[in-house]
Amino acid sequence: MQKKASHGTVRRVKRHWQLYLFLLLPVVYFIIFRYIPLSGLQIAFRKYTPRGGIWGSSWVGLKNFNKFFQSYQFERVISNTLRISFYSLFAGFPLPIIFALALNSMLNERYKKTIQLVTYAPYFISTTVMVGMLMAILNPRTGLYATVYSGLFHTYPSDLFANVNAFPHLYVWSGVWQGLGWDSIIYIAALSSVPMELHDAAQIDGASRFQRVLYVDFPTILPTASILLILSFGSIMDVGFEKVFLMQNKINLRLSETISTYVYKVGLTSGSDYSLSTAIGLFNSVVNLILLVSVNTITKKLSDTSLF
């Protein structure tokens, strides 16, 4: 049986060798840039020195992890990361679904295409430019925010970037604005597969437009939304480094210091503790993996949709 299976595999490879040749490049890429670098994770369990290298540095076990857990920054960076992540998830996840359903319900194709173009455009703005625009618009003296505020109240507003409590709101809602249109693409693609016969049958039965959205369109994109929700929980501990770092200052540091910025500062700025920064990054990845598997298991029990 094994010989027959091996012969069948060889024949299949010979028959479709062009397809397997296409697979060769991504496989090599993942081996070189994804699997081989995994050997560097042992730095988290060593007292790494450039002179000793990865294999020559002394082994310290879980000392680096304990150092992070006992640090006064541990509770702060974990709470800040979770606060921003869940805030982004709850604010940003349902809006693209609502937007896609509303856009799909529009009858005027010209307005529909125009709205799509306008909402997709912010996604292609780089993070650096995006933060620069945000700072320019919210400048308390010369920005649009200052102009409108002073026109209404005849005084200058306070600096939002100097308000520590404003940081999570600025980060999350600017991200929602930037990614709303782009995140809705996959839902619009799913809605395009809904047979018109279902809408026609619902209209014959007397269903209103809202009822057709609720009972025809929404169930269609629910499996897609479930998969994307699982993936979102798999990266709940990953808050974008670039945007947080660019918006960060000494005043809002109490709520803006996340795991990604803390790893950067530990590993490359304050003392260059590569072992500690690797340990923090590994801890972050393990937590994300646990969350991904847990949410996938729960979703699989509640419905037929899951990643694996």
Image: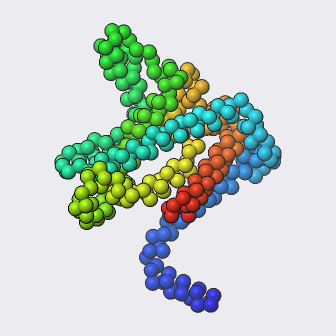
Q: Is residue 236 above or below residue 3?
A: above
- Residue at x 51% of width, y 61% of height: 303
Residue found 64% across the figure and 45% down from its top: 284
Quadrant where the image shows the C terminus: bottom right
**Taking 221 as reference, is 27 left or right?**
right
Judge by depth and name the residue closer to the eye, 57 or 69.
Answer: 69
Q: Image quarter for residue 62?
A: top right
Using the image, determine if residue 239 lies above or below residue 38: above
201 lies left or right of 57: left
Residue 288 lies, in percent from the top left, at 61, 49
Residue positioned most to the top: 154
Residue at image point 46% right, 79% down: 17
Q: Quadrant of the N terminus?
A: bottom right
Up/down of 198 relative to 67, above or below: below
The picture places residue 247, in percent across and down from the top left corner, at 49, 29
The answer to whether residue 262 shows anywhere in this view is no
Going by the image, does 138 lie left or right of 82?
left
Residue 101: x and y in percent read 32, 50
**Which residue is depicted at the point 26% across and 51% down?**
209
Residue 298 lies left or right of residue 216; in this view the side is right
Quarter assignment of residue 51: top right
Observer-nearest residue: 256 or 193? 193
